Image: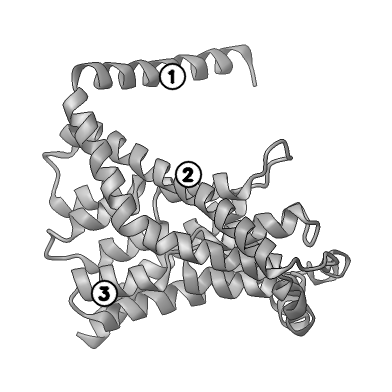
Amino acid sequence: MGRKSKSRRIAVEGGLLLLAVVYLVFFPQKASAATLAGLSLSVKTVIPAVFPYLVLSGMFIQTGLADRLAGRMQRLTKGLFGLPGCCGGAIILGILCGFPVGARMAGMLYRRGSINKEQAARLTAFSDFCGPPYILAVFGAGILSDIRLGLAVFVIQTVLSLIAGMILGRGKGGQSEAYLPTVKGRGFTVSFTESVTSSAVTTLSICAYVTFFAVLLSALEPLFACIPSYMQALVYGFFEMSGGMNRLAKCSASLVPGTAILLWSGLSVFFQIYAVLQGQGEEKISMMPYLTVRFLTLPLGTAIMYLLFRIIS
């Protein structure tokens, strides 16, 4: 990076931090209200949707169940995704439980030596999307008043993500043999206590990101006051998924923008997954495969959902 580019980056970062200070100093009540709203969202939505699944995924690896499943899943995961069998549980639980379960399991498998860094990045890329409970209950039954449309979004999301995983794994099946898991599972008590403790820390981190973006969006709210409501939902959804979905509930045409918001999932989720995936003092795992899959599934999934709705309506 050149000296001018570095100076420009420092100037931009300093300007943004200064604007943040100005907002907090001159609009403390609005910032406090947004913080409380973010915390309320975390308690009512994030913790129930994340914490129990993180405990479950942690115990799946800690007790050795992932190792026992590895032999049976090896042929499938190697042939389709170029990944060792121990990744099979992460793929299944990631799809069924939603983010950040897949990323957390990928990070755990990498840190224990079951997969390498490149495999962890690919596994995260196609196993971390919005979970079916949120899609079916909030988007399908709640916003669209038709759970079948929510189910269609989930199926499209799952199929496209698995196809993306196959594309990323092409020609890499031979690499999976060297990274079969060799670590013995721990006892139930140790696995349970460690899973609950680490899951609590991860959940708190996720809630912090949700709360931060709630405050950020409260500061940016005046900029979006004059644009149509569905555009407001898309802008909010770009930063934070739940905020976008809340705005979308007020729109009449919500299928297409809602599908786009769910498939993108927001910058907040990106940073949540990044924080969950990385370990302290370790070489960072690339997030480029994750972003690549998002940029592919977002337009394709939205277009498919639009065409499907036109056909059935």
**Residue where numbered disc 3 is placed:** 140
User: 270 and 182: which one is in front?
Assistant: 182
Judge left or right: residue 226 versus residue 23: left
For this orientation, the residue located farthest to the bottom is 312
Q: Which kind of residue does numbered mark 2 sit on?
A: Ser
Label 1: few (<14), some (14–19) or many (≥20) C-alpha neighbours in 10 Å: few
The residue beneath circle 2 is 205
Drawn side of residue 1 relative to residue 36, left or right: right
Going by the numbered disc 3, the residue's amino acid type is Gly
Q: Is residue 21 above or below residue 79?
A: above
First in sequence: mark 2 or mark 1?
A: 1
* Residue sitting nearer the eye, 144 or 204: 204
Mark 3, other Cα within 10 Å: few <14 / some 14–19 / many ≥20: many
112 to the left or right of 29: right
Q: Are marks 2 and 1 in contact (CB under 8 Å)?
A: no
Q: Within the image, what quadrant is residue 185 found in?
A: bottom right
Q: Dot 2 lies on which element?
A: helix
- Between the C-alphas of marks 2 and 1, the distance is 26 Å
Residue 12 disc label: 1
Amino acid type shown at disc 1: Val
Q: Secondary structure at mark 1?
A: helix
Give the spatial CA distance, label 3 vs label 1: 40 Å
Q: Give the x, y percent position of residue 212.
A: 36, 37
Quadrant of the image occupied by residue 36: top left
* Residue 217 visible in the current orientation: no
At a point 40% along the width and 63% down the height, the residue shown is 49
